[in-house]
């Protein structure tokens, strides 16, 4: 196992902090994580998924958006456009590394990070599979219609604010898609360990499934 803290720059010159978690040095399949507002690369939910991916032989790259965690900038600078640029810059960074021979790239976006992930998947063909956890619909439906990467939405049934938005996004998607609603769970899936477990398993299985399908 490899876990390394890295820094990279966005196209706008902001320095962002990232964490690479990989089973070995080959780093062939990788998922890039886009966290929600107020969160960071240390999100326990994202880290839980990353551990599952590690066990499945898939690497993860978690990074802090502008104005979050250890990255440069202020929270007010972390606009939708900036987060999109941050995510594309993270993808560029991962793909540019000489020690990375990526076959398949996935993106996991949570909450507002899901908004950035949808736009990225709509415009960047490098993204071959996507998981959205409690995604927010901030004028993103036009981009959702353009997404071609197979997409799983994971949503808690008791997340009354985001659930309608997640359903709007799901209905707009024209790609292979599934909506996984975890009964009894809220926005953070922290009401019971079984909710977090179900969420992590569903996310990991989606990437394993579609990475394997792309290999065939």
Image (tube, grey):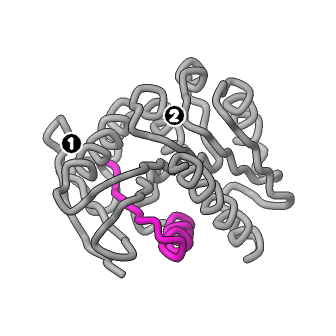
Residue 59: where, in percent of width, then height? 41, 65
Quarter of the image with the N terminus is bottom left
Asked whether 213 or 205 is in front, the reply is 213
In the depicted structure, whether residue 186 falls above or below residue 190: above
User: Can you tell which mark lies on residue 196?
Assistant: none
Task: Verify whether residue 49 appears in magenta.
Answer: yes
Question: Residue placed farthest to the front in the image?
Answer: 216
Q: Which mark is residue 10?
A: 1
* Residue 76 can be seen, yes or no: no
Across and down, in percent, residue 105 comes to 42, 49
Query: Badge 1, how many Cα within 10 Å: few under 14, some, many 20+?
Result: some
Residue where numbered disc 2 is placed: 118
SS at badge 1: loop
Q: Residue at x 53, y 46 (%)?
A: 214
Residue 178 percent across, percent down from the top left: 74, 42
Crowd rating for badge 2 (residues with CA inside 10 Å; few <14, some 14–19, many 20+): many
Residue 146 in which image quadrant:
top right
Decide: is 105 above or below 76: below
Of the numbered discs 1 and 2, the one sitting upstream in the chain is 1
Residue furthest to the right: 183
Counting from the top left corner in percent of width and height, residue 61 is at 37, 60
At a point 52% along the width and 68% down the height, the residue shown is 53
Q: Is residue 199 left or right of residue 61?
A: right
């Amino acid at each position: 196992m490899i876990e390394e803290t890295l820094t990279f720059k966005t196209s706008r010159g902001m320095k962002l902090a990232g964490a690479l978690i990989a089973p070995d040095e080959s780093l062939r399949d990788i998922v890039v994580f886009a966290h929600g507002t107020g969160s960071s690369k240390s999100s326990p939910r994202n880290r839980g998924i990353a551990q599952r991916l590690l066990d499945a032989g898939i690497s993860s790259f978690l990074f802090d958006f502008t104005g979050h965690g250890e990255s440069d900038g202020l929270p007010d600078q972390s606009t939708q456009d900036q987060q999109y640029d941050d995510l594309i810059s993270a993808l560029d960074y991962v793909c540019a590394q000489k020690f990375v021979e990526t076959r398949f790239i996935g993106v996991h976006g949570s909450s507002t990070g899901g908004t950035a992930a949808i736009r990225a998947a709509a415009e960047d063909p490098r993204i071959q599979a996507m998981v959205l956890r409690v995604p927010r619909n901030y004028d993103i439906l036009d981009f959702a219609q353009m997404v071609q990467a197979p997409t799983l939405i994971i949503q808690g049934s008791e997340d009354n604010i985001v659930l309608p938005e997640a359903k709007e996004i799901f209905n707009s998607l024209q790609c292979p898609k599934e909506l996984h609603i975890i009964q009894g769970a809220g926005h953070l899936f922290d009401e019971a360990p079984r909710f977090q477990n179900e969420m992590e398993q569903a996310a990991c299985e989606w990437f394993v499934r579609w990475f394997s399908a792309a290999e065939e």
